[in-house]
Image (cartoon, helix red, strand yellow):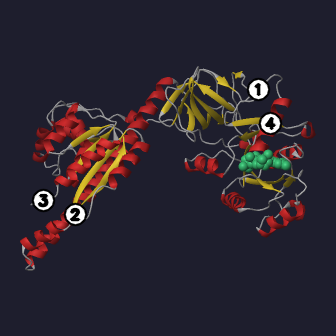
């Protein structure tokens, strides 16, 4: 853990300058206001010197961690496979999912209405009654993009990829992408669904040969990749698809503990009119129940109600089961890992607080790094100038050269959401001419912080806050350091201000 000097000064109720002076006296490295980040050890040293009695808080490192996988998974109960449907655009992914979803209702509880919650369960039919697999979980968002977005966030939920290939169209660019993905993903099985076989133009043999040419060894041609012929439109072959998936799942021997604390992933989240923030959680291990305290990213939730994909309230969600969970304090993000705090709410809150702090800390460290880079560049520039002077080039000449060169208005931009930050950066970046240009040295989401002002000071920039505020202390700091701050919530006015300041950099015209 680290703490900035300015924060420490605030906590110890002491003027920062004074503290810096004392630290210098004690022989701690020479420091410049607001930039220094102290380790918890150094910070506590400072506190001790100042007559305080600090406690290093090990709790600050507290987080919730996933359970280690059990030693003997073969004794655990089976879990449903999780399937993602992918394939080229228009090859029938959505239609196939729709038909599968309606089958699930027809065969499942009477009277259920399908809900789009990000995933749904399909019962395995009578043909495989002896199967250890009773249901299959389909992720409801088709396609490569959804899969890679989840994977990019570390969410690894898919066991089986069904690659849909239209029998009247064959192997297309996105088909190849899916085949490559299936090849590189560990522990993911591939099934080929040759779709639209109801069409007169369907040519299954041609598709099979094309797949072979792509290096896919189909079972029907002596290889090990199963394929089924289906029509998402008529429902033909879907039983076959279900059975093929359940066979693969059985061979893969997918199992999960149902008694441990609940773990899973957020598939979707939104604010519901009646229920507030809700999120679909796919449970991957353990059993989720109302009352449980869970954490996802930097958000926690005391599970109020759980609803399944048929719109029924449920009291238990076991591995493989997708449920919408209400009771979130804020909206979690799709792809977030969900973990249950075994000791309840307090642990959940503590973990969330620590995670937030960790993110802020990383941000500060990154800013400090950037500031140091700017400083280094400036030092090199100064050294080069000095060297040039030594070598007989007069200072005037050097400065003269700079005068002739372009002037630059540097900006540090903060905004309320990433979209507006991008918009502001985009609209001010174009401002300038061959005499003066603008350069954004740093930009980010959130209120204007001390680190932003420090950044601006180091790089001789001004700070623009778009639809955000800053604390009084930050304002004071900016005043002290002579860093201009500008706040507004109209892009047009921001552009005006930037134009004004940029032209002010130019020498007066005669
Ligand atoms: P996606 O882009 O892969 O999700 O494809 P869609 O499910 O949206 O289907 C694209 C088009 O193909 C739509 O017009 C569907 O009606 C049609 N389609 C999908 N599956 C079948 C099928 O099995 N048979 C026939 N004849 N048409 C299909």
Residue pointed to by mark 4: 122
Residue pointed to by mark 3: 507
How far apart are labels 2 and 3 at the CA level? 10 Å
The nearer-to-camera label among 4 and 1 is: 1
The nearer-to-camera label among 1 and 3 is: 3
Count every numbered label the image shows and give the total: 4
In the image, is 83 to the left or to the right of 13? right
Residue pointed to by mark 2: 435
Residue pointed to by mark 1: 113
The nearer-to-camera label among 4 and 2 is: 2
Which of the two discs, 4 and 2, labels the residue nearer the N terminus? Answer: 4
Q: Could you tell me if residue 39 is visible in this image?
A: no
Residue that appears at 33% across and 55% down: 429
Q: Please tell me whether mark 3 sits on a helix, a strand or a loop.
A: loop
Find residue 16 and report its image quarter: top left
Which residue appears farthest toward the front when viewing the image? Answer: 510
The nearer-to-camera label among 3 and 4 is: 3
Does mark 3 have its CB less than 8 Å from ligand 1? no
Q: Please tell me whether mark 4 sits on a helix, a strand or a loop.
A: strand
């Amino acid at each position: 853990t680290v703490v900035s000097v300015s924060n420490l000064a605030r906590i110890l109720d002491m003027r920062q300058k004074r503290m810096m002076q004392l630290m210098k006296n004690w022989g701690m490295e020479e420091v410049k206001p607001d930039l220094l980040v102290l380790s918890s050890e150094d910070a506590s040293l400072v506190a001790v010197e100042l007559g305080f009695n600090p406690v290093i808080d090990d709790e600050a490192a507290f987080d919730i961690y996933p359970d280690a996988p059990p030693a003997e998974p073969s004794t655990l109960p089976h879990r449903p496979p999780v399937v993602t449907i992918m394939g080229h655009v228009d090859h029938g992914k959505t239609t196939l999912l729709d038909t599968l979803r309606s089958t699930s209702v027809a065969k499942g509880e009477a009277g259920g209405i399908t809900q789009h919650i990000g995933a749904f369960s399909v019962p395995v039919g009578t043909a495989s009654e002896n199967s250890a697999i009773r249901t299959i979980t389909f992720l409801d968002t088709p396609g490569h993009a959804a899969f890679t977005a989840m994977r990019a966030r570390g969410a690894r939920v898919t066991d089986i990829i069904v690659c849909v290939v239209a029998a009247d169209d064959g192997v297309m660019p996105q088909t190849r992408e899916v085949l490559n993905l299936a090849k590189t993903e560990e522990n993911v099985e591939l099934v080929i669904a040759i779709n639209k076989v109801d069409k007169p133009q369907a040519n299954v043999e041609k598709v099979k040969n094309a797949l072979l040419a792509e290096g896919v060894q189909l079972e029907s041609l002596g290889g090990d990749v199963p394929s089924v012929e289906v029509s998402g439109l008529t429902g033909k072959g879907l039983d076959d698809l279900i059975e093929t998936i359940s066979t693969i799942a059985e061979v893969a021997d997918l199992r999960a503990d149902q008694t441990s604390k609940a773990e899973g992933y957020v598939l979707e989240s939104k604010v519901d009119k009646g229920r507030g923030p809700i999120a679909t959680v796919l449970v991957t291990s353990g059993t989720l129940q109302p009352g449980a305290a869970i954490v996802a990213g930097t958000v926690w939730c005391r599970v109020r109600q759980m609803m399944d994909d048929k719109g029924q309230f449920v009291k238990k969600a076991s591995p493989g089961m997708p449920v919408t969970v209400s009771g979130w304090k804020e909206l979690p993000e799709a792809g977030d890992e969900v973990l249950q705090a075994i000791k309840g709410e307090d642990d959940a809150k503590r973990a969330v607080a620590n995670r937030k702090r960790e993110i802020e800390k990383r941000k500060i460290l990154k800013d400090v790094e950037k500031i140091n880079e700017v400083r280094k560049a400036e030092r090199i520039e100064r050294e080069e100038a000095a060297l040039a002077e030594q070598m007989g080039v007069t200072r005037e000449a050097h400065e003269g050269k700079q005068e002739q060169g372009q002037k630059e208005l540097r900006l540090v931009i903060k905004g309320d959401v990433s979209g507006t930050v991008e918009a502001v950066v985009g609209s001010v970046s174009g401002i300038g001419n061959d005499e003066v240009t603008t350069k954004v040295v740093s930009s980010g989401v959130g209120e204007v912080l001390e680190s932003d002002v420090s950044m601006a000071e180091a790089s001789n920039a001004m700070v623009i806050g778009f639809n955000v505020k800053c604390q009084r202390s930050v304002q004071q700091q900016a005043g002290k350091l002579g860093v201009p701050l500008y706040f507004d919530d109209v892009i047009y006015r921001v552009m005006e201000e930037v134009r004004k300041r940029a032209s002010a950099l130019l020498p007066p015209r005669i």
